[in-house]
Every structure is written in C-alpha cells, then in structure tokens.
Image: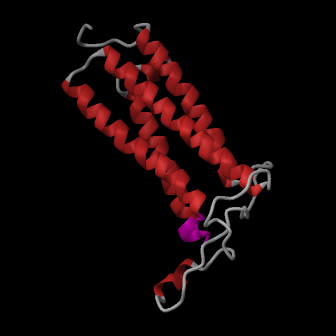
Amino acid sequence: MRSLLKDWKWPAIAVAVSAFMLAAAHAFETFGHLAPCPLCLRQREVYWALIAMTLTGLVLWRLVPKRRFLVALNMMIGLVFVVGVVVAFYHSGVEWGLLPPPAGCSGEGPIDPMAIQDFSKPMQVPSCTDAPFYILGLSMAGWNGVISAIMAVLSFIAAGATFRGAVDMTAAD
C-alpha cells in the first residue's frame, strides 16, 4: 500500500479508476442499451471533473514538486470523490423512493439509443426512479457510491501519508 501512496501514483490511480468508471458507464449505455437518466449523467460529471483537476494538478506538481502541493491535490481528489458519494447516494435514494427526484427526472422510461438518430421525434428522458438492475441489492448508482466512498477514503489516507512524509519527495518543502 505504501508504494501506491508514493509521489504521483495515487493521483494517477484516481484518474485511472475515474476513466474506468466512465468507460463502464458508456459500455452499459452502448452495449446494454441503457440510456442514462439526468442523475446518471450528473454522476459522470464528477468523474470528468476529477480527471481534469487531477491531470492539471499532476502537471503543476511536476513543475513545482512540493510535498504540500501533493497533500492538497490528494485532499482535493478525496473531496471530489465525496461529491460523487453524495450524488450517487442521492440517486440511490431516488431509486428506492426515499428521496424526491429532481425536476426533469421523471421521464417516460428508457429509450432505444439507436432511435436518437430520428430527430423528428421528441427524445424521452429516462426516469431517475427506475434502476435497470440490482447486484447484491445495490443499483449501478449504489455501487458508484460505494466505489466513490472507497476512493475518497484512500485519497485521504494518501494525503495523510504524504503529509507525514511517507512519500519520498525530490524537493524539500
């Protein structure tokens, strides 16, 4: 575990996990014919933001390799994953009927993504209340929340390890 917390490795892992989550979502959409609802798209925005922020942070850290900058980057990564947890668990709450769906989330159900090419027909927005399937009692939104929570905790652990000096830095702070 300690080697994963070394210098740029944890932010790179966070980017890789985020890219994998986006790829999985797009694979379900494309091959599973599961059109995303507005809350599904909101969950994806968190990963896109994390990737952009982290890659920018890694470039800046490479220019000025200070330990405190890497601590801040790992903390920000953790906070972005916390936002992902909140969005995912809100979506799960909507699916379970525990929370009201936001405006625009009560669509007529899933649509065939291939039918979008006919622009003369109005596009239906899938409902945020309908989970397409459950695995071990959790929907895709629920699993997204679990993965985001694990990644947030690991990001905070990486920030703490970096702060305590567990990371071998090339430049002294």
Vertical position of residue 88 compared to residue 108: above or below: above
Vertical position of residue 152 compared to residue 145: above or below: above
Residue furthest front as drawn = 103
Q: Is residue 156 magenta?
A: no
> Is 66 or 89 nearer to us in this picture?
89
Taking the spot 35% from the left edge, 26% from the top edge, the residue there is 8
Relative placement, left or right, of 88 versus 92 is left
Taking the spot 53% from the left edge, 19% from the top edge, the residue there is 157
> Which colouring convention does the figure follow?
secondary structure
Vertical position of residue 8 compared to residue 115: above or below: above
Q: Position of residue 19 (x, y in %)?
A: 45, 48
> Is 114 or 129 nearer to us in this picture?
129
Q: Position of residue 71 (x, y in %)?
A: 39, 19
Taking the spot 52% from the left edge, 49% from the top edge, the residue there is 21
Check the picture and name the quadrant holding the C terminus.
Answer: top left
Residue range (magenta): 29-37
> Is 20 or 109 nearer to us in this picture?
109
Q: How many marks?
A: 0
> Is 2 or 109 nearer to us in this picture?
109
Residue furthest bottom as drawn = 120
Q: Position of residue 51 (x, y in %)?
A: 39, 43
Q: Position of residue 39 (x, y in %)?
A: 59, 57
Main secondary structure found in the magenta portion? loop
* Residue 83 falls in image quadrant: top right
